Image: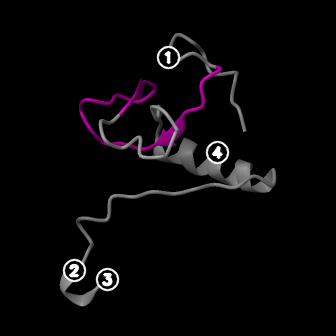
Amino acid sequence: MRYTTLNQRWVSTPLDVDVCLVQAPWDTSPYGRTFTVEYLGNVWKGGITHYLNVEINFLKDMARRTVLDGEPVWLGCDKGKIMRGDAGI
């Protein structure tokens, strides 16, 4: 699903470039701005991955709307704080 109604004032990536919506609570990635992460563009022949940092409620709403439109949604998360490597979880 393409969201071409986003105001270019708030998006630093051209609107014809696909972006991954993320909720990244980092000081270096303010909401409404796009960014990339070195070494995370790991899709073979996929090029650079662009991320758009959005608030969590917006992210949830877009995921819900995408699923209701019959489109797939993929998810990635930082599980480091809840991981239990000793238990294989």
Under circle 4, the secondary element is helix
Residue 51 position (above or below residue 44): above
The residue at the point 72 percent across, 49 percent down is 66
Hey, what amino acid is under mark 2? Gly
Instruction: State yes or no: discs 4 and 3 in contact (Cβ < 8 Å).
Output: no
Pointer 4 residue: 62
Residue 59 position (above or below residue 84): above
Instruction: State yes or no: discs 1 and 4 in contact (Cβ < 8 Å).
Output: no
Hey, what amino acid is under mark 1? Trp
Image location (x, y in percent) of residue 83: 26, 74
Disc 3 packing (10 Å; few <14; some 14–19; many ≥20):
few
Pointer 3 residue: 89
Q: Is residue 84 magenta?
A: no
Nearest to the eye among marks 2 and 1: give it.
Answer: 2
Relative horizontal placement of residue 6, taking residue 38 as reference (left or right) = right
Q: Which residues are magenta?
A: 16-36
The residue at the point 34 percent across, 28 percent down is 30
Q: Earlier in the sequence, mark 4 or mark 2?
A: 4
Under circle 1, the secondary element is loop
Nearest to the eye among marks 4 and 2: give it.
Answer: 2
Hey, what amino acid is under mark 3? Ile
Pointer 2 residue: 85
Q: Earlier in the sequence, mark 1 or mark 3?
A: 1
Instruction: State yes or no: discs 3 and 2 in contact (Cβ < 8 Å).
Output: no
Pointer 1 residue: 10
Hey, what amino acid is under mark 4? Met
* Alpha-carbon span between mark 3 and mark 2: 6 Å
* Alpha-carbon span between mark 2 and mark 1: 40 Å
Q: Earlier in the sequence, mark 1 or mark 4?
A: 1
Q: Quadrant of residue 72?
A: bottom right
* Alpha-carbon span between mark 1 and mark 3: 39 Å
